[in-house]
Amino acid sequence: VYRGSVKDFQGFDASQDAEALYNAMKGFGSDKEAILDLITSRSNKQRVEICQAYKSLYGKDLIADLKYELTGKFERLIVSLMRPPAYSDAKEIKDAIAGVGTDEKCLIEILASRTNQEIHDLVAAYKDAYERDLEADIVGDTSGHFKKMLVVLLQGTREDDDVVSEDLVEQDAKDLLEAGELKWGTDEAQFIYILGRRSKQHLRLVFDEYLKISGKPIERSIRGELSGDFEKLMLAVVKCVRSTAEYFAERLYKAMKGLGTRDNTLIRIMVSRSEIDMLDIREVFRTKYEKSLYNMIKEDTSGEYKKALLKLCGGDDDAAGEFFPEAAQVAYRMWELSAVAKVELRGTVQPTEGFNDDGDAQVLRKAMKGLGTDEGAIIEVVTQRSNAQRQQILKAYKAHYGRDLMADLKSELSGSLAKLILGLMLTPAQYDAKQLRKAVEGAGTDESVLIEIMATRNNQEIAAINEAYQEAYHKRLEDDLSSDTSGHFKRILVSLALGNRDEGPENLTQAHEDAKKLADVSSNDSSDSLETRFLSILCTRSYPHLRRVFQEFIKMTNHDVEHAIRKRMSGDVRDAFLAIVRSVKNKPAFFADKLYKSMKGVGTDERTLTRIMISRSEIDLFNIRGEFIDLFDKSLYRMIEKDTSGDYCKALLALCGGED
């Protein structure tokens, strides 16, 4: 099936088109609209014929004339469309290595994503256009393992997709694990050999196997084991193996998001994929970034340049309000895998060996006695002990000094640091209870806090929170939630506050029934509204069971359950259900996303940052760090370092642990 957005023009006549272009450029000023309309609605093969017809009719070079008539990005785009794909690639690579400095990103993108045939054509086109040897030029311009891998890719000898052997899959996964994670230092040659030679189909199975035996995706190991351009190249190879369309969707998104647009990247991808897989790229883009590629180009570019790019893009996937099913299927394969992987949840704070509660109590007292406070000493003790150890320090402090450590800390510390340190001294249940109380107290309710805590805690945690709440505030949590919220949102919170979720494994027949209930919008039985149906399933079934329900849902509707919730619900009810779904799918990723949002852009949401760092530090903060880097390409540690300051920053970094 053809998945490009640009097709052959019906009733094509090269001479007629050549004449039209000649007329559009003749005289003073040129008719850019006519030029872009014509060129973007012809296929590359047809454009090459127009160039030949133009030369025989006028004795002139069409590309040279276009260059003369047009300017800027629009010119780069149009001229790029006129070249055969292999020559376009050759030109991009020539520009990437000519002059001072090398554009490694361009080399990586082209060599990691092209098929064997495209690589052979590129090498030939380069030789034809520049009378030089591409491999020699690249070797002269790059170094180390990065160079070696580029040379391997330049051979265009990746095995064909039907080459897969079961035993070899297990062997390759083991070899990769032994070359990286299990070895002191890294055996890069193994990575180069396996990732550079094996077929895509084979490698996908190797990556699945790798996740099974190591408990982490291959990408995370590559980030940990390799560095620099070599690391970027290997990650690009892995992404292209998993899904070339997803790789390009991500490159396009990054080229446009934030300030400024990376026009070279945008042009290169829109031109090179327009006759290969633009429809797939659009599809992945729409699912991954919740907006259409069309809309993003529209917001990010202008003038004729914009018009031409939109023609290459084809349609707008937001228009119909629906998006394609295949992307959902891809998302699901990833999920199936994460369900079988043995992912161990790990916090970043562990109990200290040789712990001495009285000794710690003395250090804290000394840090607060007399003039001034030694914040560094307080941070050191509090962040490096487990919560259970901190509870013992509280007791030891009282026994030794007859004083209340919490009260002393409160009077000595202030601002964000005080909130963080005092939060760490409470038990997890007391801390959650306090955050919930703050969220319902006074005027206005902080729904996002209620959702974050209630949607992500397990039965034991909820039971402990209920008890701590009752003890601290002499009220039932359920009563406070009830009096402070209303409607379906209230019912969701009350149900979650029971801490009564099933804990058993999945039940397939039941999962199928549940998915049907969620999918059946048309049911006109008004006594049982959509929200009620979602509530009765999302708030009561076990996590493993819900994972299966979500998969069944995809099979039935071709949509992710998140998409359905967004489309049919709004406000707090929507946010609560989405939080539950995300927590079921991948809880560390849910928190990684919240942490990122608390710091990105202007200003920092310190309350959220503090709350998550405290509450996840002994549960899964280590996993959150891994997800953070996978999702946002930067480490949580670095982002906290950049976004906060002083002792507050010091304490957060101590909780965060390593910098990935």
Image (tube, rainbow, N blue to C red):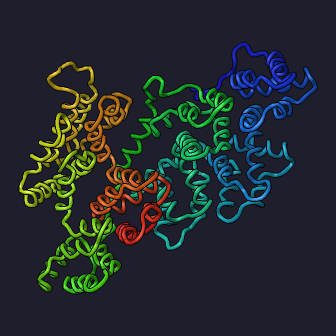
Q: Position of residue 598 (x, y in %)?
A: 38, 53
State the residue at coordinates (69%, 26%): 40
Q: Position of residue 366 (x, y in %)?
A: 26, 86
Quadrant of the snapshot with the N terminus: top right
Give the answer, above or below, for where 611 lies relative to 292.
below
Q: Among all residues in the image, which is located at the extreme left? A: 474
Along the line of sight, the residue nearer the viewer: 278 or 483:
483
Give the answer, above or below, for where 11 lies relative to 124.
above
Along the line of sight, the residue nearer the viewer: 529 or 200:
529
Along the line of sight, the residue nearer the viewer: 357 or 259:
259
Give the answer, above or below, for where 639 lies relative to 279.
below
Asked whether residue 633 is in view, the answer is yes
Q: Position of residue 302 (x, y in %)?
A: 64, 33
Left of 226 or right of it: where is 595? left
Q: Quadrant of residue 628?
A: bottom left
State the residue at coordinates (50%, 37%): 285
Q: Among all residues in the image, which is located at the extreme front? A: 371
Left of 210 or right of it: where is 615? left
